[in-house]
Amino acid sequence: MVVGAVSSRTELAIIGAGPGGYVAALRAADAGLDVTLIEKADVGGTCLTVGCIPSKALIEVANLRHNALAAQDRGLRATVTVDGQLVAQHLAAVSGQLRRGVAALLSDAGVEVLYGTASFARYDRLSIAHDDNVSHLEFDNAIIATGSRPIMLEAFPLGERIVSSTGALALTSVPASMAIIGGGYIGVELGTAWAKLGSQVTIVDAADSILSQVAPVLRQPVERRLAALGIQVRVGVTAEQPTAHGLALDTGEHIEADVIVVAVGRRPNSDKASLDTLEIELDSHGHIVVDAQMRAASGIYAIGDLVAGPALAHKASAEAETAVDAIVGGRGSISPAAIPEVIFSDPEIMSVGEPLPSADLSTKDHGTLVSHRFPHVASARARTIGETSGSTYVVTDEHGTVVGVHSVGPHASELAGEATLAIELAATVEDIARTIHAHPTMSESLAEASWLAHGHPLHVRR
């Protein structure tokens, strides 16, 4: 191994080039800082390479096949075959195009990108190992954005038949049967996609339900759709071990599966990069403890999956902007109440702000908060799509200010922007109701729920 004797220097070192790291690099370069970005694999990180982007591309391909086959009552007759090799190439192409775009932006901004594995030699110095070489980089400030990795199960070691969520996105043929261990959003998204492509899917979860952290009224339309797709859901049971043709449950039952996907969650990479050389604190889940400006120690910042909160790309990007603002002397902070969460299930789920009260009533008072529900069965756009399940909910305080928005239905993810903006601006239900929404769109469901909250329901009976 060749070790560099002389250190180079940068004003800001960033470890990890995912949606947190590369956004931090671009913003810091915009602010005039000398920036060095270190990445051990591909620019774009987990999200662009093996996470958000390829999974959503797979979901869109699966929806194309499913919708074509399910449209007979609307006058379409279709026969669809799946070329798994071409599907895999498509996912790789989508990810590659976005990664190249990010790399071009970094180059244009003057960000130096170093490839290798970084670790802290001391509080102001990094060692960067690449192949047989080790170089050193000293810095004034550092942002740690090393993300997270899938949690694996000792009884289910990865191999030809047992894959992680990453492996499930790299399959080049549709398995006749698939078992997914884990009924969280990753398991549900992957299970739905592969079922729509023709696999017989079983989801296994030790919790009492899938999507156990999601409000029942948002979860139930998804449960019904899983059943309609022929997906078997086994909850309250534990996968014990793989077998020659599937897996065994702790109940003594056996599930047939050509492929087993382990999707039981992710863990922060806080045990990497020799972080123990720094004076930082970890919480009980292994997250780095930071202040409101993402500061973990003097001159050291942490963002993204490394810190508490939902493991979301857009959260990491927002935290990146907060950290850079702090480095250049700003006082901005991030508001956890305004981080939208989206599950690309069928139908989609979107939540932001205060959680939904448990009762599924059109209008229900829970202390100082009130929820207002607009059912999509009354939505013109939902009718044209052919999917009227689910509802949109607006949660308000005693002043009529919007403090939460939740939706389960077609294209619910597209409501996240307006919903988050409403909470950020402390908009009232009258503000949303009197904002002209294009017709017919799913965004009208926000206005309809707001009219209901305002006391003047429009397309729902009084």
Image (cartoon, grey):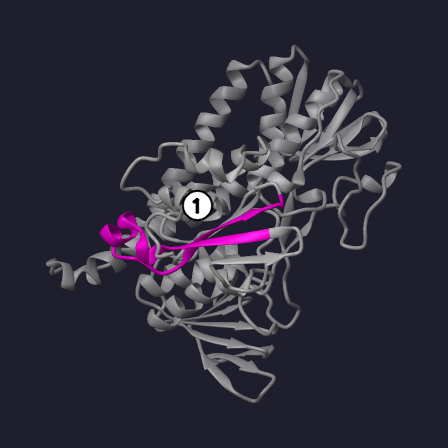
> What is the quadrant of residue 313 in the picture?
top right
Q: Which residues are magenta?
A: 370-398
**Relative depth, front residue between 347 and 312:** 347
**Residue farthest toward the bottom in the current orientation of the protein:** 252
Residue 453 sits above or below residue 119 on the image: below
Q: Position of residue 39 (x, y in %)?
A: 62, 33
**In the rendered image, which quarter contains the N terminus?**
top right
Q: Position of residue 317 (x, y in %)?
A: 59, 32
Residue 292 sits above or below residue 7 on the image: below
- Amino acid type indicated by mark 1: Ser
> What is the quadrant of residue 209 in the picture?
bottom right
Residue 188 sits above or below residue 455 on the image: below
Residue at coordinates 55% horizontally, 66% vertically from top-left? 182
**In the rendered image, which quarter contains the C terminus?**
bottom left
Residue at which label 1 appears:
413
Residue at coordinates 47% horizontally, 59% vertically from top-left? 362
**Residue farthest toward the top in the current orientation of the protein:** 32
Residue 111 in magenta?
no
Can residue 193 be seen here? yes
Left or right: where 11 falls relative to 438: right
Left or right: where 77 falls relative to 140: left
- Indicate the secondary structure of the residue bearing disc 1: helix
**Relative depth, front residue between 349 and 374:** 374
